[in-house]
Image (tube, rainbow, N blue to C red):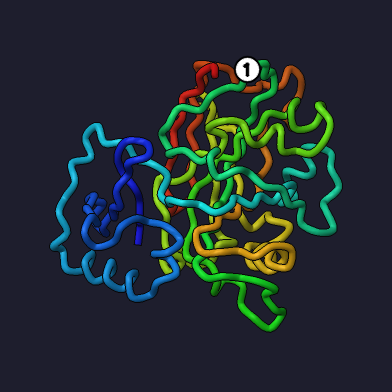
């Protein structure tokens, strides 16, 4: 299923994109697309049954904002340097263990919302990423368990980053990762059964129409399953938590000088096979 949330920011309502690409209203079937829904097999069953019945009301998509496909996100866990080609382009050694950092949930915006270039920024960068959405509480996932059984679905994430804040200003990466609007998510949350193998997805990103990133999740150093298992040993993953699993080569930081960092007026588009497409215009904060 392709689940999404539509409407003005802070007042989104649940919806579904059916097999014919028609937007359908889930109001009255579920309260929201959130961790509580993803952890409730019976509620998900009602959604599936409603979708298959063909009786859900059609929503007019004209002028309708598509918000983040997930409400009440608990935490956004991010994995750095998780693609072989990205590590090579930045001159970094592939990490022996996953590099883990956090983004605040309030960085999450819709797939077509405006992204703000922070005040004082000179190195705002792009990163297309596969987002993993947790559907079952995961703590200390064992070697004999399937970590993918804890995954409810997947989405496109844009891990926008300010590299000077991240790398040159001291402390941790958090300063360059948590600026306002720095995590567009969606447009849909696609349930895991529809996605199949998460290590066989193509990722692309364009800046002002020019292809910058063209990768595949097969290049991940640590697979989605490995990441879920690893993170669960350092923190509890709850339904509705999100994991951004890293970006392939092609970011501005890895380009030759002068590096083409983002400025107000730039337009970034990105997509992952089967998970939809995003488009953001960048403006000054």
Residue 41, image x and y in percent?
A: 38, 75
Badge 1 local density, few (<14 within 10 Å), some, or many (20+)?
Answer: few
Residue 277 to residue 229: above or below: above
Task: Name the image quarter holding the C terminus.
Answer: top right
Front residue (pair 233, 123): 233
Outermost residue toward the bottom in this view = 144
Residue 83 appears in the rendering: no
Seen at 61% across and 72% down, the residue is 147
Residue 19 appears in the rendering: yes
Seen at 74% across and 27% down, the residue is 165
Seen at 84% across and 31% down, the residue is 170
Residue 264, image x and y in percent?
A: 54, 16
Which quarter of the picture shows residue 251?
A: top right
Front residue (pair 190, 103): 103
Seen at 13% across and 62% down, the residue is 55
Describe residue 267's horizontal placement relative to residue 139 as left or right: left
Residue 90 to residue 147: above or below: above
Which quarter of the picture shows residue 33?
A: bottom left
Residue 162, image x and y in percent?
A: 68, 28
Residue 258, image x and y in percent?
A: 73, 17
Task: Name the image quarter holding the N terminus.
Answer: bottom left
Describe residue 168's horizontal placement relative to residue 32 as left or right: right
SS at badge 1: loop
Mark 1 = which residue? Answer: 119
Residue 225 to residue 84: above or below: below
């Amino acid at each position: 299923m392709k689940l999404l949330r539509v409407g003005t920011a802070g007042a989104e309502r649940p919806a579904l994109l059916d097999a014919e690409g028609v937007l359908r209203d889930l109001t009255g079937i579920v309260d929201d697309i959130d961790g509580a829904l993803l952890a409730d097999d019976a509620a998900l069953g009602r959604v599936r049954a409603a979708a298959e019945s063909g009786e859900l009301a059609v929503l007019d998509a004209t002028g309708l904002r598509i918000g983040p496909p997930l409400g009440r996100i608990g935490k956004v866990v991010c994995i750095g340097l998780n693609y072989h080609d990205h590590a090579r382009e930045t001159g970094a050694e592939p990490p022996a263990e996953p590099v883990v950092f956090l983004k605040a949930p309030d960085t999450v915006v819709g797939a077509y919302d405006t992204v703000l270039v922070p005040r004082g920024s000179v190195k705002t960068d792009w990163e297309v990423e596969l987002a993993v959405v947790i559907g079952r509480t995961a703590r200390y996932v064992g070697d004999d368990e399937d970590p993918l059984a804890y995954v409810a679905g997947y989405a496109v994430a844009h891990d926008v980053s300010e590299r000077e804040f991240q790398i040159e200003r001291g402390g941790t990466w958090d300063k360059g990762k948590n600026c306002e609007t720095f995590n567009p998510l969606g447009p849909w949350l696609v349930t895991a059964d529809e996605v199949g193998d998460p290590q066989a997805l193509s990722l692309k990103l364009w800046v002002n129409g020019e292809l910058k990133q063209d990768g595949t999740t097969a290049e991940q150093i640590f697979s989605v399953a490995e990441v879920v298992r690893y993170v669960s040993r350092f923190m509890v993953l709850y339904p509705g938590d999100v994991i951004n699993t890293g970006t392939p080569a092609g970011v501005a930081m890895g380009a030759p000088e002068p590096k083409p960092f983002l400025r107000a007026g730039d337009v970034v588009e990105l997509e992952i096979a089967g998970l939809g497409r995003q488009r953001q215009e960048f403006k000054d904060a």
